[in-house]
Amino acid sequence: MNTKDFKILLVDDEPDIIEFLSYNINKEGFEVFTAQNGKEAIQVAKKVNPHLILLDVMMPEMDGIETCEVLRQDKNLQNTVIAFLTARGEDYSQIAGFDAGGDDYIAKPVKPKVLVSRIKALLKRFKVTNGDSIDENLIIKQSNLIIDREKYVVTKDEEELVLPKKEFELLVLLINKPDRVFTRDEIFSAVWGDNIIVGDRTIDVHIRKLREKIGENHIKTIKGVGYKFVN
């Protein structure tokens, strides 16, 4: 991985953390940008279009969850990987983060080497999901859905849907092979990557959000196994 090719936005309201993490990430060759609150993060993100945003949850004025929701509304940032970097480890906080469109959840304090390893794993997923590794078709049509993988757009009954990055990847995975049952392990590996640790309810949250947007009947749960797309 050529780290110089990647831009990282680090967002935290504590200057000491910003300085410490920026130094260690920059030392690995990444181009690092910083912001100390949600509003500033949105401005910087729109300006530099980072590949990865490390976003603190507990911040004044606009917290990380709300910031993530705003970022995900920008089409230019749909491909940006967003990882929450926070001391909060409660399940409800993680679920809220994934609901908002986050891709990963990293608990503070985190050792620099561990953080850099997680960053590289996340950016590998960025490279894969922006390629054509799932299949060669950039336009996928199933039932009343049209997916444009190049533009990152989903259309349902001629109405454009806004899907966060992981919801989009999950839908592409399932819809590529209708009626094929994907196990939870297969979904984790394909969408989140083997090197990324996420909570057990992560898939369930994303499936629920997808069903709300594309319709309850398109994704079927196979109890004890996983999920499949049905027309």
Image (cartoon, rainbow, N blue to C red):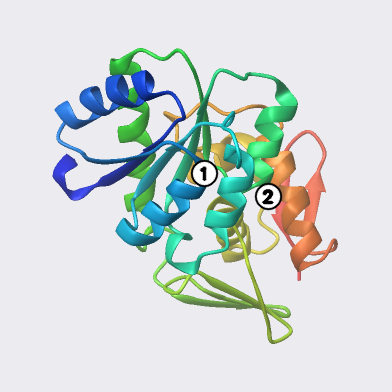
C-alpha separation, residue under disc 1 versus residue under disc 2: 39 Å
Where on the picture, by quarter, is residue 109?
A: top left
For the residue pair 61 and 72, the one nearer the viewer reads as 61
Asked if 206 appears above or below 188 in the picture, the reply is below
x then y, percent, for residue 69: 61, 52
> Closer to the N terminus: mark 1 or mark 2?
1
- Residue in the picture at 44% in, 75% down: 138
Let me know if residue 145 appears in the view.
Answer: yes
Let me know if residue 183 appears in the view.
Answer: no
- Residue in the picture at 18% in, 40% down: 3
Tell me the quadrant of the picture where the C terminus can be found: bottom right
x then y, percent, for residue 194: 45, 31
x then y, percent, for residue 52: 37, 44
Comparing labels 1 and 2, the label whose residue is closer to the camera: 1
Q: Is residue 135 toward the left or the right of residue 3 in the image? A: right
Q: Name the mark on residue 134.
A: none
Check disc 1 and give the amino acid type: Gly
**Tag 1 residue:** 38
Crowding at dot 1, Cα within 10 Å, few <14 / some 14-19 / many 20+, comes out as many
Check disc 2 and give the amino acid type: Val
**Tag 2 residue:** 181
Asked whether disc 1 touches disc 2, contact meaning CB atoms under 8 Å apart, the reply is no
x then y, percent, for residue 179: 70, 60
Asked if 158 appears above or below 216 in the picture, the reply is below
Q: Helix or strand or loop: what does disc 2 sit on?
A: loop
